Image (cartoon, helix red, strand yellow):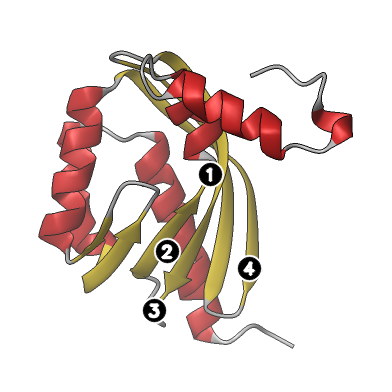
Amino acid sequence: MTAPPEDDARRRGLDDWAAFFEGLSTDRLDDLDALTAPDVRFKDPFNDVRGRAAVRAVLEHTLASCRGLRFTVTHRAFAGDLAFLRWRFEATVPVVGALDVTGMSEVALAGDGRVAAHVDHWDAGEHLYLRLPLLGPPLRLIRRRLAGPAAAGRTG
């Protein structure tokens, strides 16, 4: 039995989307029109936007704010019109320094393979907020007080 044409288009769309992020640069931002639905949603711990122009603005800000930015997609999974990407993000960010984050994205794909929604899941508290000079110490204190006994020896 062969997969419906929509499944093939969605798989190609996800492959193209993953390649877009792995090669993310200002030169590649014009590819958003071909890769996404006009009302695409993009959500991460800092943003929740709709539309290609808004997604482009978020990515432009990311590229301007991060030195040595690199995404590596390590895993992919499909469940109908929804796909999941596991990725690693590496960059140097002002105030925080070097970041090395493993996260997951839910990617909703239209029947033609274009991205309808991209929702990132990663722990901004662990990777970013705890490392900020003024915010980090009180957050670490709260974290220690809320942690169970097995976590008492944990660093960070």
Q: What label sits on residue 78 in the rendered view?
A: 4
The local crowd at label 4, few if under 14, some if 14 to 19, many if 20 or more residues have their Cα within 10 Å, is: some
The x and y percentages for residue 127 are 51, 28
Which residue position is annotated with label 1?
Answer: 122
What kind of element bears circle 3? loop
**Mark 4 secondary-structure assignment:** strand
Q: Amino acid at mark 1?
A: Trp
To which residue does mark 3 refer? 110
- Quadrant of residue 29 in the image? top left
Locate residue 146: give its quadrant.
Answer: top right
Q: CA distance from mark 4 to mark 1?
A: 19 Å
* Residue 128 appearing in the image: no
Q: Which numbered disc flags the more N-terminal residue, 4 or 3?
A: 4
Determine whether label 2 and label 3 are within 8 Å by CB: yes
How far apart, in angstroms, are the residues tagged by discs 2 and 3?
A: 9 Å
Considering only vertical position in the picture, is 148 above or below 50? above
Which residue does the numbered mark 2 point to in the structure image? 13
Q: Relative to 56, does residue 153 appear above or below in the rendering?
A: above
Quadrant where the image shows the C terminus: top right
Q: Is residue 74 left or right of residue 112?
A: right
The earlier-in-sequence mark between 2 and 3 is 2
Distance between mark 1 and mark 3 Cα atoms: 24 Å
Of 14 and 136, nearer the camera is: 136
